[in-house]
């Protein structure tokens, strides 16, 4: 596996890797929009809120391979930017009670925030790819995304539990 990873980063030109990863990120963003629109039609649950960051944490296995390893200052930078970006997602994620169930409120701002994050990601990759290796850049963007999803999901969980306790108290 290590040989394959090294082959990818030595044989495939950096611009191709950058474009490819951007296309994959765009498809993931589209998937997130679709999943979010479907999720707003089904009741929310603690499990549905907590599982995404846990599942995403398996992506940290990428750091087992040398090309993806990130210097500690870059780790802190990426996580800090992710945490800052999470505030936008936290502000647009709201729950509502309907028919005794708790639902995630649909938000038009979520689509614009995701599109804005895609633009920032592409711009960041284009600017940083001239000074940082593509593998390390991939690691940094993983950390940024993880730093964004964890606080967002923690905030969602807290909001969900508060509304759940109020709903149960009112019943």
Image (spheres, rainbow, N blue to C red):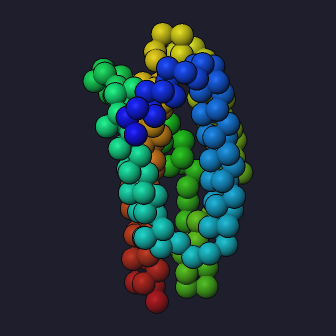
In the foreground, 72 or 106: 72
Identify which residue is drawn at 62% across, 75% down: 42
Q: Is residue 84 visible?
A: no
Q: Residue at x 55, y 21 (%)?
A: 11
Where is residue 132 drawn, in percent x and y? 46, 15
On the picture, is 51 further left or further right than 93?
A: left
Q: How many marks?
A: 0
Q: Which residue is at a point 64% across and 32% down the rendered structure image?
A: 20
Farthest left residue in view:
72
Closer to us: 51 or 130: 130
Residue 107 at x, y = what percent?
67, 55
Q: Quadrant of residue 81?
A: top left
Q: Is residue 94 above or below residue 99?
A: above
* Whether residue 138 can be seen here: yes
Quadrant of the drawing holding the N terminus: top left
Outermost residue, top side: 131
Rendering quarter of residue 95? bottom right
Q: Taking 171 as reference, is 127 above or below it?
A: above
- Residue 146 rendering spot, x and y as whole percentages: 42, 43
The residue under the point 57% across, 76% down is 43
Q: Where does the image place residue 156, in percent across and percent down from the top left?
A: 46, 59
Q: Is residue 155 above or below residue 45?
A: above
Q: Residue furthest bottom?
A: 171
């Amino acid at each position: 596996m290590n040989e394959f990873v090294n082959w990818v980063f030595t044989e495939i030109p950096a611009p191709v890797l950058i474009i490819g990863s951007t296309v994959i990120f765009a498809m993931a963003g589209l998937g997130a929009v679709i999943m979010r629109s479907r999720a707003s039609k089904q009741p929310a649950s603690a499990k549905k809120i907590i599982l995404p960051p846990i599942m995403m944490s398996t992506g940290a296995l990428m750091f087992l391979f040398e090309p993806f390893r990130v210097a500690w200052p870059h780790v802190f930078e990426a996580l800090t930017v992710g945490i800052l970006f999470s505030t936008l997602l936290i502000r647009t994620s709201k729950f509502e009670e309907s028919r005794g169930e708790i639902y995630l409120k649909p938000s038009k701002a979520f689509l614009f925030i995701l599109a804005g994050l895609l633009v920032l990601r592409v711009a960041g990759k284009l600017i940083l790819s001239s000074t940082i290796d593509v593998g390390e850049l991939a690691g940094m963007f993983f950390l940024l995304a993880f730093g964004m999803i964890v606080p967002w999901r923690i905030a969602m969980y807290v909001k969900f539990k508060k509304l759940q306790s109020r709903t149960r108290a009112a019943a």
